[in-house]
Image: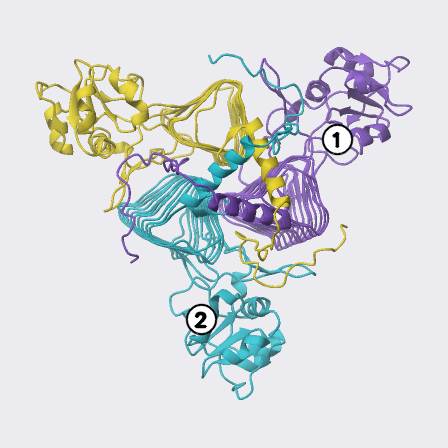
Chain colours: A purple, B cyan, C yellow
Amino acid sequence: MAKISFFPLAVAPTLGEVAQWTGAALSRGADAGRIVRDVAALDEAGPDDLSFFDNPRYLDAFKATRAGAVLVAPRYAAQAPAGCATLATPQPYRAMAEAMARLYPQAVRPRSAFGETGVSPAAFVHSAARLEPGVIVDPGAVIGPGAEIGAGAVIGPQVRIGRDSVVGALASIACALIGDRVIIHPGVHIGQDGFGFAMGPGGHLKAPQIGRVIVQDDVEIGAGTTIDRGANRDTIIGEGTKIDNLVQIAHNVVVGRHCVIVSQVGVSGSTAIGDFVALGGQAGLAGHLEIGAGAQIAAQSGVMNDVPAGARWGGSPAKPMREWFREVTALKKLARGTASREPEASEGMTTDRRSSAPSPRRPAG
Amino acid sequence: MAKISFFPLAVAPTLGEVAQWTGAALSRGADAGRIVRDVAALDEAGPDDLSFFDNPRYLDAFKATRAGAVLVAPRYAAQAPAGCATLATPQPYRAMAEAMARLYPQAVRPRSAFGETGVSPAAFVHSAARLEPGVIVDPGAVIGPGAEIGAGAVIGPQVRIGRDSVVGALASIACALIGDRVIIHPGVHIGQDGFGFAMGPGGHLKAPQIGRVIVQDDVEIGAGTTIDRGANRDTIIGEGTKIDNLVQIAHNVVVGRHCVIVSQVGVSGSTAIGDFVALGGQAGLAGHLEIGAGAQIAAQSGVMNDVPAGARWGGSPAKPMREWFREVTALKKLARGTASREPEASEGMTTDRRSSAPSPRRPAG
Amino acid sequence: MAKISFFPLAVAPTLGEVAQWTGAALSRGADAGRIVRDVAALDEAGPDDLSFFDNPRYLDAFKATRAGAVLVAPRYAAQAPAGCATLATPQPYRAMAEAMARLYPQAVRPRSAFGETGVSPAAFVHSAARLEPGVIVDPGAVIGPGAEIGAGAVIGPQVRIGRDSVVGALASIACALIGDRVIIHPGVHIGQDGFGFAMGPGGHLKAPQIGRVIVQDDVEIGAGTTIDRGANRDTIIGEGTKIDNLVQIAHNVVVGRHCVIVSQVGVSGSTAIGDFVALGGQAGLAGHLEIGAGAQIAAQSGVMNDVPAGARWGGSPAKPMREWFREVTALKKLARGTASREPEASEGMTTDRRSSAPSPRRPAG
C-alpha cells in the first residue's frame, strides 16, 4: 500500500521469488528479476505492487490495473493489461496469501502490543486528554486533546485518536486512525484481523490482513460492535455515520457519510455503502456489493445484490420494497385459499427449554 | 424525571427559552415565563415537565398527558389537553434533542468515570463483597454483601449492585441499578447511550439519553449482551428474566418478569414485553410494540406488530404460528407444482471464501 | 464426567437421597443405597453416573445407556435398559438441575477467580510466553511456550493455553482447554455458563453447567464471539475450524474439523456439526441437530432439521438449496401475476428514527 502501514514489509522479493513461493507460472517475457515493493488491490496497485485477481466480479479492475504483477488463474492471464506481468496459478487467492505471509510475517498473527506499563512512554497523550484507570496505551499511539479513554480500554501501537473523541470502557482499538468527535461505546473492537482464508481440503490458509480501519469525524459506534481491519486496503467508516450495538463490519468495507446502521447488522467483506444509507436491524449484506447512496434496507433483509441509489429494499433475499410487499401479500392470499392441515408447531433454535413450558397466560404485573 | 437521575440538570429554562432554542412556536395563551424543571415521556410527565410527541402511535398518550408543555407538530397541536402548552415545530423529536442537550449537557457524551484508582474511596463496597483483580469501581457506586465482581469489570459512578449478585469479567455497568442475586456474564455492557438521533439531510443530531437501566432481582444476562439505558424513561429487565448471549436490548425497552430471551435476539427501542414471554434465537422486534404476557416468538421471527397475550408467532414478518405454517406449506406446494429452472446457487454473505471450496464429502473424524 | 472437571463434586449421594431431593420415584427393585459418583449425558454415562432423559430425540440413547440411574418421565421408565435404575418424575430436566445443584454447588454461580494479583503465583506461565500489561491469570492456569496474551485478558483458574496460541485483548477464558496455534481475537468470551434453565410457572431453575470448552489446535475465533461451556458434556471446537466475529456457540455444541462459521451465526445447544461444514453469516441452527460433514448452509438460514452430509441448504426454515430457490422463484412469479395494492411501507426494527428522514438521493462523496 502506498500509505503508512501498521505492518513493516519484511522483504522485497523478485517476481521470480514470488513464482517460486507460490508455484505460479510467470508470464512469458516478464522480467523475473523485477522487484516487488508492496502488495495492493487491483485498483490501488502501482507498477511496484503485486496484486491478485480471483473473484470474476473484479474483471474490469483486472483489465485496467496498473499493478506490476498479478496472481491470476491461467484462463484470465491473457486479459492482463500491457506492462502487467502475470503469475498464473489455479488458486490466486491462496497464492496471494502465501506471498503476503512472506512479505508481512507480522500480519499473520494478531497485532500485539509492546507496552510494559499502562501508558507507554513512547505514546503521545495530549495534556488535555483524560484517561480513566486501567487504560493501556501502546507505543506510538496518539491521543488528541479533549479525548477521553474509558476504564480498561486498550489502545494499540500507533493508533491515533482525534480531538474530543470518547472511547468507552473495555474497548480495544488496533491498526486504526480515529477522527475527531468520534464516540466509541464500551466493548467495541476495532482493527483486529479480517476473516480471510484461502480454503482448501487440507485446511484453511490464513490470509494476512495488512489494511487499517479509518473512522472519520463524528462517527458513533455502539457497544459490542466489531470492525475488522482491511485485508489489502482499508476498512472505512464515513463522517457522521452512526452505528448501533453488536454490528459486524468486515474487512475492506467502505461505509459512506451519515449512514445509520441499526443493531446486529452484518456487512460482509468489500461491500461499499454510499452516503446516507440506512440499514435496519439484523439486516445482512453479502460481500463485494455496492449499496447506492440514500438506499434504505429494511430490518432482517438479506441483501445479495447491488442496490441502486435511493432504493428501498426488504426481504431475504432482498428485493425492492414494493416487490417484497407484493410477495408477502400474495403468499398470504395463497395460504388462505389452501385447505391446510398444519404441521406440529416447533419452536426451533431455542436453548435447552426442554422442560415444563411457561404458563402462557399469567397476567402482566 | 421524578426519580433519581444519573445526570444533573444544568438549567431550568422558561418555555420562552425552549421556544427560542428550538424555533418552536409557543401556543397562544401559554405563559412564556413558565419554568421547565425537567423532561419526561408523555405518560410520565407532570406539570413541570417538558415532553414531545412525534410518533403517531402515542396520540392517546399525548391527548392524556399531564405534561406542562409538549413539542409537537403543528397539525396535532390543537389536540393537546387543557393546561398543556404546546411548542409547535415540524420536527418535534429533533427539537426535543436540542432542548435536552441544553438541560442535560453531560448526557450528550458517554458517561465517564471519575476514579483515579481501582476502587474509588467514594464508592461503597460491602465488606462481604468480593472484587477480583483489576476491577474498577467509580465514586458513589454501591456493591452489596455477597456480591462478586469479576476481573477487569468496570462499575460506573453511582451504580448499585445488589446482594449476592455476580458480575462477570470485563463487563461494564453504568447508569444502572442492579438487584439481588443477578448474574451478569463476562463482556456484558449495560447502561451506555441508547441509539437515538434526530436524522436529517445535514447529519444526525444526537438525542441525549438520560434514563437508566433497572435490572430486577434474579435476572441472568448472557455474555456479550448489550442493554442501553433509556432515553427519557428507564430500560427495565423484570424479575427472574433470563437473557442469553449477544442479545441487544435498546433504550426504553421494558421486559416483564420471568421472560426467556434466547441468543442474538434484538429488541428495538420502547417495545414493552409482558411477563413469561419467550423469544427464540435471532428474533428481531421492531420498536414501540407491545408483546403480551406469555407470548412465544419463534426463532428468527421479525416482529413488526403488537402480539396478543398468550399468542405464538413466527416468520418474518411475523404472524400467528398457524398462519406462518400455512404459508410455509402453501409455498412448498406451489414450488413443487412449478416447472422450474433453478438459478445458479449463490452462497451470499460469506466473507472472503473466494478460493477453492472445501471438500464437501470428507467423512467426519 | 469421567475426565478432569473444573468443578469439584461436593457429595456422593445414594439413589435414595436423589429421590428425596427431587421427589422422583425410584424404580421397583433398585438399590436405594447405591452411590452416585457423578453425572453424565446418557451416551457418556457409566454405572456410577446419574443421567436424565427428557427430550424424546434421545430415546435411543436412553435405551442403550450404561448409566447407573436415569431421571425419566414415568411413561418412558419401562424402556430403561437392564441394570439401569430409574427415577420417575414428571419433569426430568428440572429434577436433574436440582440434583446437579447439590452435587456441584460451585457450578450454579459463574466461575470466579481466586487471584489476588495480575498473575497468580499458582499459575504456570512458560518463560517463552508473553503477557501484555493488565493480564490476569488465575491459579492453576497454564500458558504454553510462545503464547501471547493480550492486554486486559482474563485467564481463569486451571485454563490451559497451548503453544504459540494468541489471546486477544480483553478476552476472557474460563473452564477451557485451548490447543496449540489457536488465535482468539479481542473480546471473545469462552467458558461461561450455558443457557440452561428448567422453566416453570413460578420461575426458571438454573441448571448447573459442569462441562468444559475444548478448543483444538489451529482454531481461529473472531472478536466478540461467545462460546459457552457444556452442561453435562463438553463444548468442542474441532481442529482448524475458523469462526468469525460475534458468533454464538451454545453449550454441548460439537463443531467438527476445518469448519468455516461466518459472522453472527448462532448455534443452539447440543447441535453436532461435522467436518468441513460452512455456515453463512447470520445463519441460525436449532438445538439437538446433526449437520453432516461438508454441508453448506447459506447466510441467514434457519436450520430446524438435521442436514445430510454434503448437502447445501438455505432459507428459513432451511431446506435443500434447490427447493429454496424453487420457492423463491415460484413466489416471485406468483406475486407478479397478482393484482396488488401494496400496503404502506414500514421500516420496522429500526431504533428511534422517528424524525425527519434522510435525504435519499444525496450523491456519494
| Badge 1: chain ID | A
Which residue reaches farthest bottom?
A: B29
In the image, is B127 to the left or to the right of B284? left
Q: Quadrant of the N terminus of chain C?
A: top left
In the image, is A326 to the left or to the right of C12? right
| Amino acid type at image mark 2 | Asp
Residue drawn 59% across and 28% down?
A110
- The image quadrant that residue B183 belongs to is top left
- The image quadrant that residue C353 belongs to is bottom right
Q: Nearer the viewer, residue B315 or B290?
A: B315
Q: How many marks?
A: 2
Residue A150's place in the image compared with C54, above or below, is below
| Amino acid type at image mark 1 | Arg
The residue carrying pointer 2 sits among few (fewer than 14), some (14 to 19) or many (20 or more) residues within 10 Å by Cα, namely few
Q: Nearer the viewer, residue B251 or C305?
A: C305
| Disc number for residue A57 | 1
| Disc number for residue B60 | 2
Tag 1, which secondary structure? helix
Q: Position of residue B137 (x, y in %)?
A: 40, 49
Residue A120 visible within the image: no
State the CA–CA distance, disc 2 to disc 1. Answer: 53 Å
Say if mark 2 contacts mark 1, CB within 8 Å: no
Q: Position of residue C33 (x, y in %)?
A: 8, 20
Q: Position of residue C70 (x, y in %)?
A: 20, 23
Tag 2, which secondary structure? helix
| Disc number for residue C276 | none
